[in-house]
Image: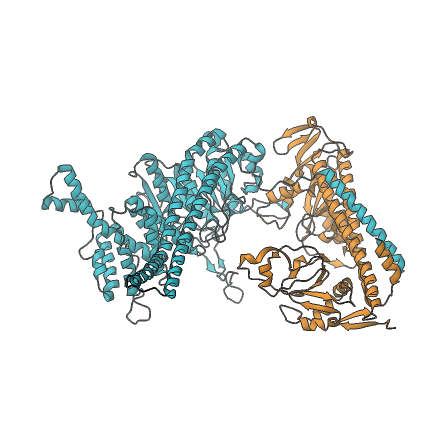
Amino acid sequence: MNNEWKEVKLKYLIDKMGDGGTPSTLNQNNFGGEIPWVVVEDIRPEIYDTKTKLTETGLRSCSAKLWPIDSVILSTGATIGEVGIAKVSLCTKQGITGLVCNEFTNNYYLKFWLEHNRNTLFRYSQGTTFKEIRTRPLGNLRIKIPSPFTNESVIEQKAIAGILSKVDEAIEAVKNSIKAEECLKKSLIQNLLTGKLKPDGTWRSKDEFYVDGKFDKVPKGWEIEKIKNLTNRVTDGEHLSPDFQSSGAYLLSAEDVFDDGISFEKAKFVRSDDCRKFRKRCDPDFGDVLIVSRGAGIGRTCKVNQNIEFCLMGSVILIKPKNEILHGGYLSQYFKSYSAWVELQKLSGTTAQQAIYLTHINKVKLMYPSDIAEQKDISEFLEKFDSDISSKQSKIQSLKTLKKSLMQNLLTGKVRVDVEKINKLLKEV
Amino acid sequence: MITKQALGSTLFGMADILRDKVEDYKSYILSLLFFKRLSDNYTWEIEHGIQEFKKEYSVEPNEKQKQKIIADKHDFTIPDGCFWEDVRKAPLDKKNDALNKAVNAIADSNAPLKGVINTVRWNEPSPDGSGGKKLHPEVLSLLINYLDAVDLSNRNASVDILGDAYEYLIKRFADENKGGTTAGQFYTPQEVVDIIVRYLKPQKGSTLYDPTCGSGGFLINAAKYIKKNTGTQKNIRLFGQEDVWNTWAIANINMILHGLDASIKKGDTLKDPKFTEEDNDLTIKTFDLVMANFPFSQENWWKNGEPKKDKKGKPVIKKDGSPQLEYPGKEDFKDPYERFDYGVPPFSNGDFAFLQHIVASMNESGKAGVVCPQGVLFRGQPEKTEEEDGQNRKADDEYMIRRGFLQGPVNKDGKFVHAINIIDAIVVLPGNLFYGTTIPGSILLLNKNKPEERKDKVLMVYAAKEGWYKEESNMNTLLPHDILRISTLLESWGDIEIAKAWIDSQKSRLRDLIQEELDFKKGEIELDTQEDIELAKDKYQNTNELIKTKEAEGKKPTQAQLNNLQKAKESLEKLIAQKEQRITEAEKKAENERMSIDEVETELLTMLVDPELRKRYFSVVGMEELEENEFNLNIPRYVDTFEPEEEIDLDEAIKSFRASLQKQNYTDDLLSNLMKLIR
């Protein structure tokens, strides 16, 4: 029996394929109908809906074709290699190709294969600034499949695709869970940092508040003070480019500041002498607060959570709270809130904020419980979420690595799977 | 009598003849129009004088008396052979010369018209030396014939009507040239002018000054305000300076057509201010009220910049293609007019130079309303020490000047000469509101004699929020209800009783504005559609008559003829329906606008009693808070310009978090089982 893995030209695995089109945007009757019209931003692993929809007239007026449910949708112009499965009948813009598999091909298998072999797709493309893959070369793309043109082939493809789909689902589930957790944390910040909710889970009653001009309702026993008066120092790291070493004292930059603490994994090194010199002006210690002051991670903040000596680069601001009145963890949680963002926006001179300034941090007014133990309870409560979210993020990374390895092995025949058992398990769920 | 709407639209029709034929065609149109007016009115003035004589004495004046009437009646003299008729009758090849001769002769015999009526060189030869004219005689002839049909004498167009129609033309020219730099230089949107004039409240006898007056919109609006309140436009004293010849001429014509007595001088306000004291021409003259929309952030305002050279001696070019300039130090700089009490502004940006010229032009109890770029509110940093910001720097001049406006000028040792806050209020406007620039502007209101209770306070009004102005593809505008929102806040400083009275006093005025706008729109539609409808009507009638003639002859009309008739009828009906549709739309828009005024009234009265909402509209800021903010006047520091954070329901959040965890566990288990089957 033909049980070998072979490379088969794509055109022999499909019934139909074709590029999409765009109706005239001048005619308003073309848009706003019921037919989903896929642009590259609409492509997901499974496509249920699109942002723009066409009318019957719109579809008929241009070269867009209607693709049935289960078609493979692949971007072939400009952005190449985004791929998904149509879960509704839909049409596409030009540069997005629809593929209908024949009886020897599993559509999810084809989708994963294209996803994994994005680089091969690039090789089939033409054009310098605007890259595209034409239909004819695409048809000649060689796809690796088990025992071509047999029923067994489809069953095996289905099992392989099934495994990979479940990895995707797991990743999606973790992503959703992060989203839900971030939302929950936001709500907790809204309630905990305003004193509405106590860290023990009980709510403050109305008469436990007093009214302040700027902050409206302030819990009794809480204070409002400028950060300048609550800290020993607000400064930032070394501005001059330091003399890096392959080992020595740690020098952390914005990339080493994470939501749940600092990391030394990718830290750079400087001579201990230099570190000592830098630390004269900027000496981060356990319990201090760090804020990324510019660049992509602007505003990211954490408490210094490790007792290792290090110095800082200029892109990170150091705040040294007066530990007897302000808990660093509480301050760090405050800087994660929307109100802190608004405060800093207000202080910055321009509309588009490009940097956080030391003088602005000093001016921000903070509302805090005067009982330092309460500050500590609040921050520890919220920090649990930060570390949990962070561990979920690393989980996504490991799932992605797993998926890559699975694709390398399963889509090439390097590892053969027990088709029967897997399809049985997949059927059960 | 013609309405100003009809007159305005008719006159703008001249633009269709001239557009793309000459550069700066607005000057051609506006000065030709002025010539026609003088000429038309000259004849009317005589007739009118004789009639008045008859009315008063019930006898015809004799020849001698007639001469006296003629001598007194004319504001301007027109020499023989220099009338409109003379130019109109001139043969085609002499037309340009005839017109040029006429306007120059009038300029020569009327001192105030020198350079005003004759800005355009009508007989300018074409540059190729062929002996032809730059403005083709046929185009000129078309223009003259078009305008000939409109009687511009007082009989048909009174001073008010003609003046308003002229202003309408100026606005249309500005609209046509929206993005170009010249539009901003001669025109400020009336809505902003309206807000400023109404806050300053010019009085009878006030002296009014605009140092960069453009076509004179501020001065005219203020004069109209006085006239409306006092019933007379006598004793209104207007002063303006403008640096561009053609614009200066437009401003002068604008004043004359409105029948206003104004002194509009030509020159660079910063280098060569024209209004100085009689006994000392280095002392700036002061006025009761100053209004201005100066050019935003003018580079090299003292004209002392030199092109910067790189090491190889090549000039350094900026991103926009203009040469980078280098300026001398300020140590040796001295303003001969001693206007810069608060500090010398950077030579690279004229904002604070114009502002200080304005402050110097205000008398002891003077007030000013100035349109500025928002940069003046926050540009420039205070002194910074090493310890504070890791840097060591002196205070910027612009910071020092702004602080000076709020606290008083300081001497060389940093001591206050006298402590006084002259900033009264600030309005932050949306972007893309002004001509020739898209950057967001603001209104700065100054007062050298603030009422006691507001002495150390500044009112900040936030008007840039989305929905508080009308967004259009090429330009934003303030609608009448947006004017109401801003002016009520300015007027009341948050006092609800004052606000109520103010809104009552403004509502009918704003409704009139809406009506006026609608009438202009209708006039425009009428003019737009007139020709097509006439043509279609003619075609229909001709076809119809053809058929009737045939029928009269006892013949049957052919099918083709009947078809033609049907077609002609349909296209006529279609055109009429389209016109009706446009009128209905315009009326609907006006109706909505009227309703919006009532809505804004409710909105404002609700807001004023809610402390939470007040914070999102305006703030009355004390000196202490300004000091705390290092005299940075950026509006978000004082007014809540950010959307409040959406509140998340905690129970909901917990529920969906739990659900997500469950789903995660489930997929994890399944995946783990699958992996067992592989390895």
Q: Residue at x 28, y 54 (%)?
A: B117
Return the x and y of residue A339 as percentages of the image width and height: 65, 40
From the image, state the color of chain A: orange
Given residues B246 and B146, the one toward you in this image is: B146
Q: In the picture, which chain is cyan?
A: B
Whether residue B573 is situated above or below residue B612 in the rendered picture: below
Whether residue B650 is situated above or below residue B88 in the rendered picture: above
Given residues B441 and A153, the one toward you in this image is: A153
Given residues B278 and A303, the one toward you in this image is: A303
Q: Report whether B372 appears left or right of A98.
A: left
Query: What colouring method underlies this structural image?
Result: by chain
Q: Residue at x 59, y 57 (%)?
A: A55
Residue B55 location, quadrant = top left
How many circles with numbers are drawn on the protein?
Answer: 0
Q: Residue lying furthest top in this view?
A: A207
Given residues B359 and B7, the one toward you in this image is: B7
Return the x and y of residue B633 as percentages of the image width and height: 53, 41
Q: Residue lying furthest front in this view?
A: B554
Specify whether residue A30 is in view: yes
Image quadrant occupied by the N terminus of chain B: top left
Whether residue B128 is situated above or below residue A349 in the rendered picture: below
Specify whether residue B486 is in view: no
Return the x and y of residue B619 as percentages of the image width and height: 54, 36
Return the x and y of residue A33 as percentages of the image width and height: 60, 55
Image quadrant occupied by the C terminus of chain B: bottom right
